[in-house]
């Protein structure tokens, strides 16, 4: 029986690991999976390889044919990859959308893994330069999100209690609404600009649960035309004419849903400091924050970051998107085509199965085969 190890190196990567395991079991039904970390992954009929001891003793008890490392950044992936390869385990990693490419983690990671699986979001030029084997797939989110129909948008508005007569601006403020304290003052200023210029808009703020709803309402001070919804971001963005996003993942969600969007955020002081010193230390700052811009290699989506993140500018950009939605929509169609280049989940699963069978980076386009552990 084919046996794989899936290692989750950070909590945010847990859902991605679950998707990979489900795809693996579709591609290779007899698959056996062990896990290292991952709360959600524990509910997927997987066993903890280090539950009664160290990783080393776990691998001695239960040899694996290959390992996939998810999340944790390149330093953490390189460290675990080296340990696994010392035990003769072929290692694959799922690349992530790092904002800064540092030279030393890239060289260490290239030496510590057999295969890098990258989506169009991921900038892996540094890994290629360091000699890593990189295979491009579509983005998994594109497998799960389809372009809604007009009736889907109307249904989402009814679900949220939003009117049909005024444009809707969705505000997606990061995980658990964590970016809302930074967004709120600028959003209030934008609301004053819209009111002063006679623009009539509905603002719908998405939060992840009822516990975040009341703090969000307090931050907005009961501003007219603003509603807070304890609903999935997908529902709120589907209902919207424009999406205001504060993180990269939500920008891709909006692009896949065909909703015109912009990214608006303030970087933390640690982000600003790291990006300021990166060039002098041999690092390269990836020029785009919005994921559709990374795919396109240009500014398809406006990015209002730091000094550009002001109420007057935000008000103008939102109105421009409402009035000229078709301009961005045409360019977002190209982004959707790029991230839907293949069925990403199935492609990832086949690459991992082939790596486990061959013990080397796989050739593409071959059906998976299954072997017994030696």
Image: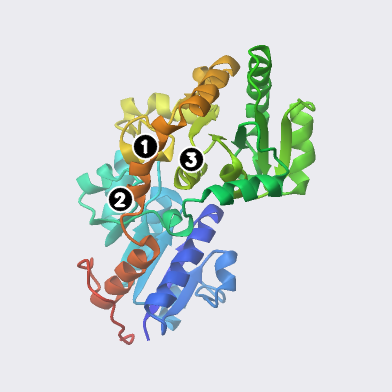
Measured Cα–Cα span from mark 3 to mark 1: 16 Å
Image position, residue 160 (x, y; %): 70, 45
Image position, residue 150 (x, y; %): 54, 47
- Depth order, front residue of 157/176: 157
| The C terminus - image quarter | bottom left
Q: Residue at x 36, y 67 (%)?
A: 346
Query: Nearer the observer, disc 3 or disc 1?
Result: 1
Say which quarter of the image contains residue 351: bottom left
Image position, residue 44 (x, y; %): 55, 73
Image position, residue 26 (x, y; %): 42, 76
Sequence-first disc among 2 and 1: 2
Residue bearing mark 1: 330
Mark 1, other Cα within 10 Å: few <14 / some 14–19 / many ≥20: few
Vertical placement of residue 52 versus 170, above or below: below
Measured Cα–Cα span from mark 3 to mark 2: 31 Å
Question: In the rendered structure, are the residues bearing label 3 and label 1 in contact, judged by CB atoms less than 8 Å apart?
Answer: no
Vertical placement of residue 308 versus 101, above or below: above
Vertical placement of residue 19 versus 325, above or below: below
Secondary structure state at the residue bearing disc 1? helix
Q: Which mark is residue 248?
A: none
Residue bearing mark 3: 251
Q: Residue at x 33, y 65 (%)?
A: 347
- Depth order, front residue of 3/80: 3
Query: Nearer the observer, disc 3 or disc 2?
Result: 3
């Amino acid at each position: 029986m084919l046996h794989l190890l899936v290692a989750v190196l950070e909590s945010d990567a847990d859902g991605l690991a679950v998707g990979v395991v489900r795809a693996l079991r579709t591609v290779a039904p007899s698959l056996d999976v062990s896990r290292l970390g991952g709360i959600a992954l524990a509910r997927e009929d997987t066993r903890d390889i280090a539950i009664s001891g160290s990783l080393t003793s776990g691998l001695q008890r239960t040899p694996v044919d290959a390992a996939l490392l998810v999340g944790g950044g390149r330093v953490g992936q390189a460290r675990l990859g080296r340990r696994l390869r010392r035990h003769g385990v072929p290692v694959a990693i799922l690349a992530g959308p790092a904002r800064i490419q540092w030279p030393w983690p890239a060289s260490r990671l290239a030496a510590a893994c057999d295969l890098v699986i990258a989506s169009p979001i991921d900038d892996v030029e540094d890994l290629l330069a360091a000699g890593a084997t990189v295979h491009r797939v579509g983005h998994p989110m594109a497998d799960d999100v389809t372009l809604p129909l007009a009736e889907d948008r109307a249904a989402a508005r009814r679900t949220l209690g939003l009117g049909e007569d005024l444009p809707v601006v969705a505000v997606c403020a990061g995980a658990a609404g964590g970016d809302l304290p930074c967004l709120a003052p600028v959003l209030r200023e934008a609301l004053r600009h819209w009111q002063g210029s006679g623009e009539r808009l509905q603002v719908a703020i998405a939060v992840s649960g009822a516990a975040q709803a009341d703090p969000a309402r307090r931050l907005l001070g009961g501003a007219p035309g603003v509603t807070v919804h304890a609903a999935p971001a997908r529902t709120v963005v589907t209902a919207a004419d424009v999406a205001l996003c504060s993180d990269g993942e939500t920008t891709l969600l909006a692009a896949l849903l065909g909703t015109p969007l912009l990214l608006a955020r303030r970087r933390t002081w640690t982000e600003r400091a790291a990006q300021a010193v990166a060039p002098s230390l041999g690092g390269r700052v990836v020029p785009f924050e919005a994921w559709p811009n990374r795919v396109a290699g240009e500014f398809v989506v406006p990015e209002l970051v730091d000094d550009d993140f002001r109420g007057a500018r935000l008000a103008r950009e939102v109105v421009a998107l409402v009035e000229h939605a078709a301009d961005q929509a045409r360019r977002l169609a190209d982004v959707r085509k790029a991230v839907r280049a293949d069925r990403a989940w199935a492609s990832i699963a086949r690459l991992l199965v082939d790596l486990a069978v061959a013990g080397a980076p796989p050739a593409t386009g071959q059906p998976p085969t299954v072997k017994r552990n030696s």
